[in-house]
Amino acid sequence: MPLTADVKAELMTVRDPRPQARVAEVTALLRFSGGLHSIAGKMAIEAELDSEALARRAARDIIELYGVRPELGRVQASSSRQEGHFIVRVREGGETLARQTGLLDQRRRPVRGLPNKLTTGSRDDLSALWRGAFLAAGTLTDPGRSAALEVTCPSSEVAMALVGAAHRLDVAAKAREVRAVHRVVVRDGDAIRAILHAMGAQRAAAEWEQLRQRREVRAGVNRLVNFDDANLRRSAQAAVAACARVERAMEILGEDIPDHLREAGRLRLAHREASLDELGHHADPPLTKDAVAGRIRRLLAMADKRAEDEGIPGTDVGIPADADVS
């Protein structure tokens, strides 16, 4: 997804100097991209990330914040994952790092949600938390009816914690579970722009908003064009049906048509695409729209009555099968 890649590329340039914000980002990055594992009887942390640049950034932050040196590795693409990804693994000191980042509680139990000190922190901390979550597992789709910013979460507790963090940033987000996968979704256009701004992707937010406005204008124009096309199509079909009925009426009645009704019928057939108002202007002397409509209506009614008395098809028989006369 080009939009997602653009957002992540911009977010990787954001460097909050405050230690607590950096802790929030690294913790979210680890929580949303990996988990805790037992390797050779030791607790280890592994994070699977999309790009080498992001993996190196995560490793550098872990070294600077916690003094732990992670291992970096690359996993080749597979049938379940079309693109290769990168592993950031901490074996030595993995349990200590898990406790420091809040992935383990004091009783060495995995924390199912997010550390409370992060979800109740300052707006800068919450922004960093969202930044790390998006870098690890976020996607952004194009503006439109199905536009969404989503973050895939490892558990329902994590999803609810991330929703709470969004609400504290004044952004409406919802937790969803689809096919046993937990996600946090932001759908409203203004909310998507707001969360992008909060995470630090100002350029991406501006570009996304411009794209949204262009598509809204284009959609509005298309709706108007389609509306006009539909009206023209219905008008044309109605004119075809009206002319067909008038032709059939004049066949049924022959010479037994009053002169004023015959003239109205001839006007309709002579100016097939004209409106009733325009037909009135063609009459001599000119007639009102209602007068023309009334004469044509009486012509059709007279013909249908004659057809019923004689047991022959009425004026409707001349209407094309594909004409929309509703």
Image (tube, rainbow, N blue to C red):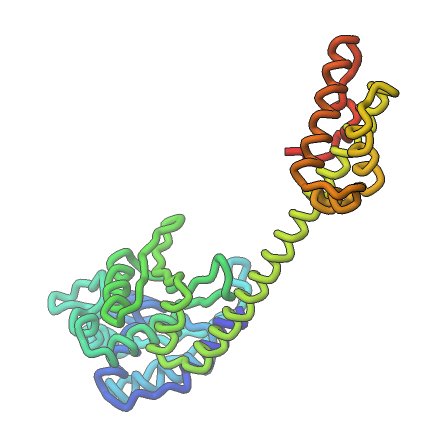
Seen in the picture, residue 315 relative to 186 is either above or below; the reply is above
Percent position (x, y) of residue 263? 81, 33
Of all residues, the one furthest to the left in this rendering is 107
Identify which residue, 137 or 124, lies in the foreground: 124
Of all residues, the one furthest to the right in this rendering is 255
Q: Seen in the image, is 250 located left or right of residue 275?
A: right
Instruction: Please count the marks in the image.
Output: 0
| Residue name at image x 41 percent, y 81 percent | 202
Percent position (x, y) of residue 203? 45, 82
Q: Seen in the image, is 312 located left or right of residue 182?
A: right
| Residue name at image x 25 percent, y 86 percent | 65
Identify which residue, 143 or 182, lies in the foreground: 143
Identify which residue, 11 or 67, lies in the foreground: 11
Location of residue 125 (image quadrant): bottom left
Percent position (x, y) of residue 220? 56, 61
Q: Is residue 39 visible?
A: no
Of all residues, the one furthest to the top in this rendering is 310
| Residue name at image x 32 percent, y 85 percent | 61
The quadrant of the picture occupied by the C terminus is: top right
Seen in the picture, residue 62 relative to 217 is either above or below; the reply is below
Identify which residue, 310 or 169, lies in the foreground: 310
Location of residue 15 (image quadrant): bottom left
| Residue name at image x 61 percent, y 59 percent | 222
Seen in the picture, residue 183 relative to 312 is either above or below; the reply is below
Percent position (x, y) of residue 179? 40, 48
Q: Seen in the image, is 129 located left or right of residue 121?
A: right
Q: Seen in the image, is 161 located left or right of residue 51?
A: left
Q: Is residue 115 visible?
A: yes
